[in-house]
Image (cartoon, coloured by chain):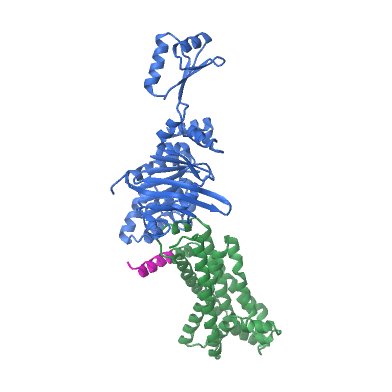
Chain colours: A green, B blue
Amino acid sequence: MTSLTLTLADSATMLRRNLKHQLRYPSLTLMLAGLPIVFLLLFVYVFGGQLGTGLGGHGAVGRDAYLTYVVPGILIITVASAALGTAISVATDMTGGIIDRFRTMAISRGAVLTGHVIGSLLQTLAVLVLVLGVALAIGFRSHASALEWLATAGVLAMFAFALIWLSAALGMAAKSVETASNTPMFLTLLPFLSSGFVPTATMPAGLRQFAEYEPFTPVTQTVRGLLTGAPVATHAIPAIAWSAAIALASYLWAVRLYNRRRAATPS
Amino acid sequence: MTINPAKPAISAHAVRKSFGEHIVLDGVDLTVAEGTIFSLLGPNGAGKTTMVRILSTLIAADAGDIQVGGHDVATNPKAVRALIGVTGQFSAVDNYLTGEENLRLMADLRHLGRAAGRRRVAELLERFDLTDASRKPLSAYSGGMRRRLDLAMTLVGNPSVIFLDEPTTGLDPRSRRTMWQIIRELVADGVTIFLTTQYLDEADQLADYVAVLDHGRIVAEGTPAELKRRVPGGHIQLQFAEPGALRAAVGLIPAGTPDDDQLIMQVPGDGSIASLRRVLNELHDARIDVENLSIHSPDLDDVFFAVTGHATTGHATTEPSARHEEEALQR
């Protein structure tokens, strides 16, 4: 076998291992889905009537308008929340005994991390389907075409890929599983400081600038545009740029941490 | 697999390692012949695990020349990893998978292929008496079962050099004996075993060659028999009923050292049947009654004490009563 097929085979083996973990212990997946679902119900039913008024509707009409507005934000916070799982699973592996076994075996470099990242990506997509199912059940409707839905899935997957690598790096950097489950928490805060829940125009200066330029806003706006038929192009480019930059920087960081933990054996 | 005792499976020269200010290995030399059991013996903190981690490519030495299976650990760790298997002190199993899935994972990572992998897994489950528990989660496994699974995972790829870092620490005597049996079978198949242990009797039971590591240096090495020959201490102890008998015995056997208060005499000897019979025949012919007799042969405890100047601190094997209890259980 060539080294590329070996890398693919080892990564596939590690992916299977992570998927088995997820299927055997679905509580983590459900916990990751729980947070965005709670936010969805909270924002639509508790705050939605009032927030919808600000969007130009009243009463039930306002709530429906807010549901349409908030679902893209909820999908983005789902991606952020699901990425937390990566840090936990990576840290669990790194602090356990099995990683030393892997390191004394002739396994392709990076297969361990690749397995975690692809596994988390599939987990995130499953959680997104779950959250979208709840959104549809409480009345969310979109006129998006099949192509636009596909593009939405693509944008979400791209952003998820970036945040998962970031979370993997944070998981590598953490000394314990407890730390690893806390450090990426800021990711679930950033959607609130973006256009995810309220238009950035309503925010005070300073915060507004931050919200307009942070990565969650262009990604949210791209998804919102695709699902509601608003223009997409001006947001899509920064969304792609942010995702690529976060993914690349986090990938390099995670791999560097992984190799350093190999304790400097040249290989 | 051909066994060539002259060809070293592992050779290490002038290995040094320190963590910050703390020197863990201070110029260690060792050679392990192919197809033998080598035991690195030492108390906690002697540097045994660090040595295993260096030899198994987990960490790099600060200095030294190390070859495993003919490959340089520093420049070609990949080749080394392809032929070694490591079972560490801490369990290296995937707790979220079943025993069978753990073994399948190893088979996949060793690229055995589907059919061959399945065969190898079934064979190892059978051999390690884990077939009944193969589909159970690891939470249902006992300490001994986990350790057996751990070793089985190490064996999936048929490694030719196996590192066992304190493989029986924390196991009950029965599981320990099972582990010893497995280790003996492995070496009978031609595998080279590098075993670290703090149990002196374990090295005595298993090892072809023993090196004693203390404070990062090899302080003694040799076969267990050679090491034991180096230390004095083998003797027969005779207990008499009355002082007259003791005095008569002293006259008869000048080499003996009497203790008048306790009415005992120690006769130096190797503890063999012949030497024992000679002493008893002499006493019998002189009609001297011996009330009781005990044999003390030097063991690795004596060796350890002699070469390090301290006992294996904090361990049960330094307590004679505990050691005898353990030996009794092993019978």
| Residue B72 in the image, given as x and y percentages of width and height | 39, 56
A150 drawn magenta:
no
Quadrant into which the C terminus of chain A falls: bottom left
**Residue B191 sits above or below residue B230 on the image:** below
Q: Quadrant of residue B207?
A: top left
- Tell which residue pokes out farthest to the right in this image: A204
| Residue A236 in the image, given as x and y percentages of width and height | 53, 86
The answer to whether residue B249 of the structure is visible from this angle is yes
Decide which of B78, A93 is in the foreground and name it: B78
| Residue A177 in the image, given as x and y percentages of width and height | 57, 61
Decide which of A256, A51 is in the foreground and name it: A256
Decide which of B258, B329 is in the foreground and name it: B258
Query: Magenta region's main secondary structure?
Result: helix
| Residue B7 in the image, given as x and y percentages of width and height | 33, 47
The stretch in magenta equals A1-16
Quadrant into which the N terminus of chain A falls: bottom left
Q: Quadrant of residue A52?
A: bottom right
**Residue B264 sits above or below residue A166 on the image:** above
Q: How many marks?
A: 0
The answer to whether residue A27 of the structure is visible from this angle is no
Q: Residue at (30%, 45%) from the top-left corner?
A: B4
